[in-house]
Amino acid sequence: MPGTGIIAMDKKILLGHGSGGKLSQTLIRELFFKWFTNPVLNTQTDSAVLSAEAPHLAFTTDAFVVDPIFFPGGNIGKLSVAGTINDLAVSGATPAYLTASFIIEEGFPFTELEKIVSSMAQEAKEAGVQIVAGDTKIVNRGKCDKLFITTSGVGWIGEPFLSVSTGKNVQPGDRIIINGPVGDHGMAVLAARELTHFSTDIRSDCACLNHIIQRVKVTCPEVRFMRDATRGGLATVLTELAENRPFGVEVDESAIPVSEATRGLCELLGFDPLYVANEGKFIAVVPLSESDSVLSAMKDHPLGVQSAVIGQIVEHHAGHVWMNTSIGGKRMLDMLAGEQLPRIC
Amino acid sequence: MPGTGIIAMDKKILLGHGSGGKLSQTLIRELFFKWFTNPVLNTQTDSAVLSAEAPHLAFTTDAFVVDPIFFPGGNIGKLSVAGTINDLAVSGATPAYLTASFIIEEGFPFTELEKIVSSMAQEAKEAGVQIVAGDTKIVNRGKCDKLFITTSGVGWIGEPFLSVSTGKNVQPGDRIIINGPVGDHGMAVLAARELTHFSTDIRSDCACLNHIIQRVKVTCPEVRFMRDATRGGLATVLTELAENRPFGVEVDESAIPVSEATRGLCELLGFDPLYVANEGKFIAVVPLSESDSVLSAMKDHPLGVQSAVIGQIVEHHAGHVWMNTSIGGKRMLDMLAGEQLPRIC
């Protein structure tokens, strides 16, 4: 980077970078504006001023505290952009704008911060989304763990997709499709944090899903429900789908994609991959008549090559999720009571 | 609170409260939904789905890491709501929706969290704003300092106020009005943190400014610029107003309200109250012809009783802020180079 200002390559973040004064300005201009540059952000006003592009909007937020901040397949910055874009996209919205708030530990290396910020910029660019406002707070050494990022997002929702986030039109007979193998993100982060002497090929699936979800929306405007399977994993999303509803959910264990590496590490450590976090997986619930075309549209996208129909909505056992196990039995899936893996997102 | 669920009065926050499983659900339902309840939030979807109420929106975010989390005049929760509402309001927007992300240290007492959340609910209610989405992450003990909150906000902007945030219509002759004494927030937080054996009456001015700003907009639809004077204080806002513009700013030190207690503590510690943070103060730049009516509209509001015209936009010394000092001299105001008081917001 051009070492023109107060920040040079070998510099560390100081408390003064959060002062609101000249050092803050330098950090904002030489780092955040450099990477996130766009006309709205560059006005440097207290709020981004934007045009409403549809009569309905989606609005969401997520905090990211993943440890370690760099892991195979991504880092906290890429994750913070993908996570919020995915929350908008599964709500049926076209993601448009993000904000990003950084809480940074004094002494954090500027070069690491730039790696993170640049990967946020790249991820946002690929997703077609602008980062339009932000905030930076610096806390004394030892008062946070390196870096936390909170992103918020706004997207526009067309009339046909207003009920996607609640799934109110879901009905018996609908099929449940997932865009690929589950559990990779959680196990990749766990391995990077706890098993540093252990060799594994597992990479986080961290990715922006808005483009593949757009294909689903185009192929099937009647899509009934979408949700990304993050904390709590696929099992939690399925239980939330069924909870308090007049229908049940039935899934086939053998149909749920799980990579060999993730399955092996889960078996070794006693984890159930269905409860392990993903950051690039979503389920779509679609009418039976559309399930073949949606499946093939998803398989055509790089983020959906291993898409699979994993189950269906059924009339019986309303409110509950049952799984036909690989060995021919049945097992009820429930939410986790407590914590399986802390700080995976 | 009704001790019906897993959370009881004497309980502390556990890592499992951030799992995405049953404990998370309990925390969300028994705390956040209890206090923030509204139809949008209660759908519990990945994004809040909202109606666009105007063709233009303002979108902003701020992280709050104030230490201590409780201080005279407020707490981190009240601050996090007021701060983001104020960023929207000074941009000319009518604040409509907030999101709130919590990063909580394992072991944090539930009763303190409820005090904070309930004050957020009260502040949002008084401001007429709904908290429509949120997120909770729990980090291991020692990995953050008790509690950090990031809020984001969306508001609607009417056509006449689209240029308020950039101040592009500001011109020589315009008057600068502030709604009361400066420096109280920063000194109240400093005293609560560092001077625990020192008795002072200073209270943070932490407050939502959207209602008083609405009076300014009604009285003077030609309002040229508004900005809240937070980190970096009044001096920083004035230097940002003048920076790279074809006009100068001139203020009169004797016209700038400072409470006796804050002035005294600043003198004792060597702080300049013009650079100390506020959380309930804003400047409005208005045409000379409107300044009397705006001043009296502001004085009529409880948050503007001590409003004062403190200066004007001038043709000379373009890009700079000069202050006529109380003792008859002149002094140029500049941005702070580094940090005066860390973690005041």
Image: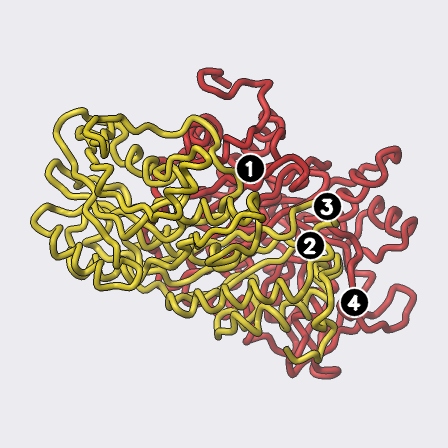
Chain colours: A red, B yellow
Q: Measured from the top left, where is residue A202 in percent x and y?
A: 79, 40
- Closer mark to the observer between disc 1 and disc 2: 1
Tell me the SS state at disc 1.
Answer: strand
| Image point (65%, 51%), residue name | B146
- Closer mark to the observer between disc 3 and disc 2: 3
Q: Residues within 10 Å of mark 4 (few under 14, many from 20)?
A: some
The foreground one among A27 and B163 is: A27
The chain ID associated with circle 1 is: A
For disc 1, the marked residue is: A138
| Image point (71%, 82%), residue name | A318
Which amino acid lies under the numbered mark 2 shown in the image of this protein?
Answer: Ile
Q: Can you tell which mark lies on residue A337?
A: 4
Disc 1 and disc 3 on one polypeptide chain: no
For disc 2, the marked residue is: B138
The chain ID associated with circle 3 is: B
Tell me the SS state at disc 3.
Answer: loop
- Closer mark to the observer between disc 1 and disc 4: 1
> In the picture, residue A176 is in which quadrant?
bottom right
For disc 3, the marked residue is: B142
| Image point (53%, 51%), residue name | B150
Give me the C-alpha separation between circle 2 and circle 4. Answer: 15 Å
Disc 1 and disc 2 on one polypeptide chain: no
